[in-house]
Amino acid sequence: MGKALIIGAGGVASVAIHKCCQNPDIFEEICIASRTVEKCDAIKKKLVGSRTKIQTAQLDADNTEMVIDLIKSFKPDIVINLALPYQDLTIMDACLATGVDYLDTANYEPLDIAKFEYKWQWAYREKFAQAGLTALLGSGFDPGVTGVFCAYAQKHYFDEIHSIDIVDANAGDHGYPFATNFNPEINIREITANGRYFENGSWVETAPLSLKKVYDLPEIGPKSIYLMYHEELESLAIHIKGIKKIRFWMTFSDNYLNHLKVLENVGMTSIEPIEFEGQQIVPLHFLKAVLPDPASLGPRTKGKTNIGCIMQGLKDGKPKTYYVYNICDHQECYAEVGSQAISYTTGVPAMIGAMLILKGIWKKPGVFNVEEFDPDPFMEALNQYGLPWQESFSPTLLD
C-alpha cells in the first residue's frame, strides 16, 4: 500500500517499526533514518525475514535540506517523526517542500525553554491545507490514545463532557535506583515544569508536583498520582464540547521523586548552559548521558502500566461517568518486540495513525490533533494491534 520514512531509532521507533513490519500489506517498504545509522541497522537486523522491505540511512534531522534530500531519494508516502520534539518543525518543513504527509508523537519544543504547547505546529495549518497534505500531531498514547478515548466518549456516551482526568500510571520496576522510562531530557523537563490544568475557560498553574492524590487503579492497585501539565490538555480544551475541567495525573514513586529532588537541588536538571573545563555544557544533557538508556530497560522491567481517561458529563440530561483505559504488561511487550511498555504504548499508536493516513481513513488537508478525526477505526485498531482497552461506567471520580 505505501512507503514510510521513519525518523528515529530509539525505543519508540523500534516498536513502531516492528508493528509496521507486522503489517507488510500496508507498510510495503520503510526507511529507518537516524543520526546514528548503526542504531537503524541494529533494528533492521532484528527484522530479517520480514515481508516489509527495510533500508536505513544516516540523517541529521536538525537539517531540513538533509531531510528533503532523503525524502526525494526514498520517495515515501508518509514521514513518521519519532525523533526529538526539537526537530518537529524542520521535518514538517521538509514534508511541505516535498509533498509528503507527516505524523509525530510529541509537540514541538524549543531547545532553550520547556513550553509543551502546539502554537508552533498549529501555525502550519494553512500551509499543509494549501498543499493538500495531512499532518497528524501527537499520535502516541498521551498525547494520542488519550485524545482518541475522549473523542470516542464524546461520540458514543455523552452529549456534553464536563470533566476529564487523564491518569498515566506505571507500576513497572526496572531495578535501578533512578532511571527514566523514556528520553531522560524530555522526561525530566516535563516533571520539573509547573503543573497546569484547565478549569472554567482559563488555566490554573501549580508548583511542580504540588498536587497529589491516591487513586486505586485496576490491576495495579492504589498509586500516588501527581498533577502535571501535558500538551494534550491544550487541544482537548478546544475540541471537546462542553468541557469545564481537564487535568493530567502521573504516578511517581517516593524513591524516584527523592532522587529527582536531589538532582534538581544540585543543578543537574537545568537546561541553562554552564562552562566546564573550557566548554559550554547543559547539565541536563550531561545527566542524560550518565543515566541508563531507556531502550536498555526492556529486559529488566516487570509490572504493568495503566493509562486512561475518567470522564463525567451529561447524556440525555442525566449525569454520566465513564472510564476507559489500557493495561499493558512490560514483560509481554518485551517478549513481542524487545521493548518495555512505555515505548510500546507510544510506538503502536504511531503505527496506527500512519496506517489510517495511508488507508485514506484519517486523511484530509491541514494540521490536526487525533481527537479531530473519527475515533472508531483507531479504537478498533488498538484492540487489533496490542493495546486493548477496557471501560467502566462507575469509576471512582477524582474530586
Image: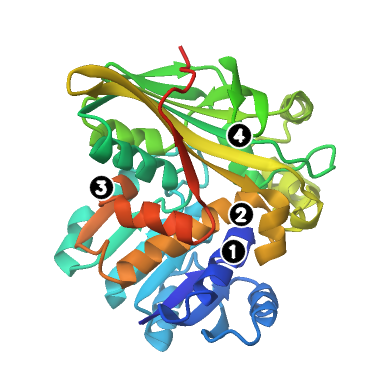
For label 4, the SS is strand
- Asked if marks 4 and 3 touch (Cβ < 8 Å), the reply is no
- Give the residue number, with chain letter if any, for mark 4: 169
Q: Earlier in the sequence, mark 1 or mark 3?
A: 1
- Between the C-alphas of marks 1 and 2, the distance is 7 Å
Circle 2: residue type:
Ser
Instruction: Please give the label number shown on residue 131.
Output: none
x then y, percent, for residue 91: 40, 65
Q: Earlier in the sequence, mark 2 or mark 3?
A: 2
Furthest-top residue in this view: 399
Answer few, some or many: residues within 10 Å of disc 4's Cα (few below 14, many 20 plus, some between 14 and 19).
Answer: many
Q: Is 21 placed above or below 296 here?
A: below
- Between the C-alphas of marks 1 and 3, the distance is 25 Å
Of badges 2 and 4, the one in the foreground is 4
Location of residue 42 by image quarter:
bottom right
Q: For the C terminus, give its image quadrant.
A: top left
Residue under the point 58% across and 16% down = 213
Circle 3: residue type:
Glu
x then y, percent, for residue 41: 66, 80
